[in-house]
Amino acid sequence: MLFIDFHVHMGELGGIWAEIHGKIEHSPEIWIKRMNKIGIDKAVVFPFVSGLLTHEDFKNANNYILQAIKKYPEKLIGFCTITPMHGKWALTELQRCVENGIKGIKLYPPGHGFYPIDGAFMDPIMEFVAKNDLIILTHSDFNTKICTPFHVVNLAERFPEVTIVMAHFGEDPDVCHWVPDIVKKVKNIVLDTSCTPDIPESIFSRPINIIGPERIVFGSDAPTLSPEVNLKKLEVAEEIYNIPKEVKKKILGENAARILHL
Amino acid sequence: MIDDMLVIDAHCHASPAPTAGILKTGWGGLYQCTIEELLKRMDKNGVDMAVILPSGNKVFPEDVKILNDWCAKIAKKYSKRLIGFCIINPLHGDFSIKEIERCANLGLKGIGEITPIHHVPIDSPIFDPIVERAQELNMPITIHSDFNCPWNTPERFARLAKKYPKCKLIMAHMGMSPDLIHYVPDIVKDVPNVFLDSSATPELPESVFTRPVRELGKNRVILGSDWPTLSIECELAKIKVAEEYGPVHGWGYKPLTKEEKRHILGLNMAKILKIEI
């Protein structure tokens, strides 16, 4: 079964964060070792950027990804990270990354300027994305007022030709159950199961019944979060809440392969 | 048993009427289960004992009594596997105090789960008499915690714990937030009567298990699943990952040791519940 992890951070977490939390480097070699152990064939990888840092910081972080995908093109698919808070520079950086092989953008509104993801300043980025056939992968959180699933729906409705992969189901265990209903009519939104509550029924089984089996992709949010635990969630959903094998194949890799044009 | 270690799931919900009314599908329309199904799933996963936190209507005192009577009954019936907690509604004033005493006499070992549905901040004076009585009766209290629910935050929890240092307070869900869970050990560092229950925590093995154990000591983290909605399988998988992966994956801590795992899996909850092993 083709297994693609749609949500993996890669790079160095440094600067002031390293002073407090310790230095982390999640290198391609470390990740590929874990991939092989678990049986993951490919992964979408994008940087760590721990705050609304400078242009230089974002560029260095993106460079790490560009180098990783050059070294391991058969295993890693690269997304870059930019923020509309960097204005025009964000677009030049995006252009540079596209020329070097990235297939999409990872957006992290809470950490990269606390900006509303459906704000008008997203339009130039979204137009570029549409023109260059890129994918948007965005964080979502019911409790961080600027990128709830409702905000993501607003953005997706404005740009129906862009595939928007929404990670985390809004992150909240009390309300994640209704995310499929929220995104049902907005066909260009795909749900990424990374950093979701450990509720197998709400994350895997129920969404299939509401939005169909083609709009969900497996994500782990490695290295901080665990692909092993997310996989176990899927196994429990299979066993107790019934997921047919055909559907499991789509969630684990076929949907991702289609979205990424692999 | 897992790896020859006693396993106690500190956080399971069950109800006398899993097919009645709103409980037919439970919160979010999710599947509810019977005690027999719980026991089967416990067997499958190596869980020796489970704490039952009764679920159901708590609006009227009569409803509360029904739930507690039922819980006492099944805890007695499956005394080797299940430990019963009683439920109260803090808005019932004096009735709640009497109910706690009545339930202690019925053999129920603690109180919980206190959830946000009452709209009462957990460090408010409304809770004080209840916590005071629980402290006197030596009954631990399991309270839902959520950084994003203003009346049940870990910060309020710490405030409550400081007021009643002899009452064992179990912080279910460790604040629930994937972004803020990392800071929970700092919040509860000075209140050793607060225990961290891993149910409904994010998939962050290092922040759920390793970091709290290293920062607070191995006596303060307990395994919980929030059965049936959430998954004991995922909790156990988190522990497995914490045992396997070390510094490269986050905070720089070495992997979880066997002794730490033993405490998390069952030793800590056994001590809280005064269970002889």
Image (cartoon, rainbow, N blue to C red):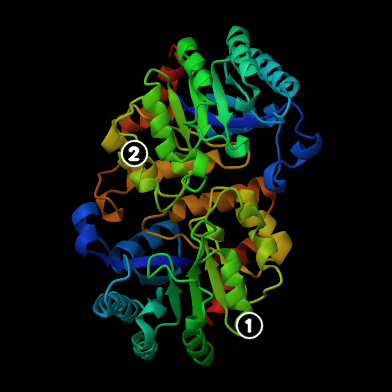
Residue B135 against residue B12 in the figure, above or below: above
Percent x, y for residue B182? Answer: 35, 47
Q: Quadrant of residue B208?
A: top left
* Between B239 and B11, the one nearer to me in the picture: B11
- Observer-side mark, 1 or 2, equals 2
Label 2: chain letter: B
Percent x, y for residue A235? Answer: 58, 50
In the rendered structure, find residue B187 and report the number of the disc placed on it: 2
* Between B41 and A216, the one nearer to me in the picture: A216
Answer few, some or many: residues within 10 Å of disc 1's Cα (few below 14, many 20 plus, some between 14 and 19). Answer: some
Q: Is residue A254 visible?
A: no
Residue at image coords 43%, 52%? B178
Identify the element where label 2 is drawn: helix
Q: Quadrant of residue A84?
A: bottom left
* Between B82 and A125, the one nearer to me in the picture: A125
Label 1: chain letter: A
Residue occupied by mark 1? A160
Percent x, y for residue B95? Answer: 65, 16
Percent x, y for residue B175? Answer: 45, 43
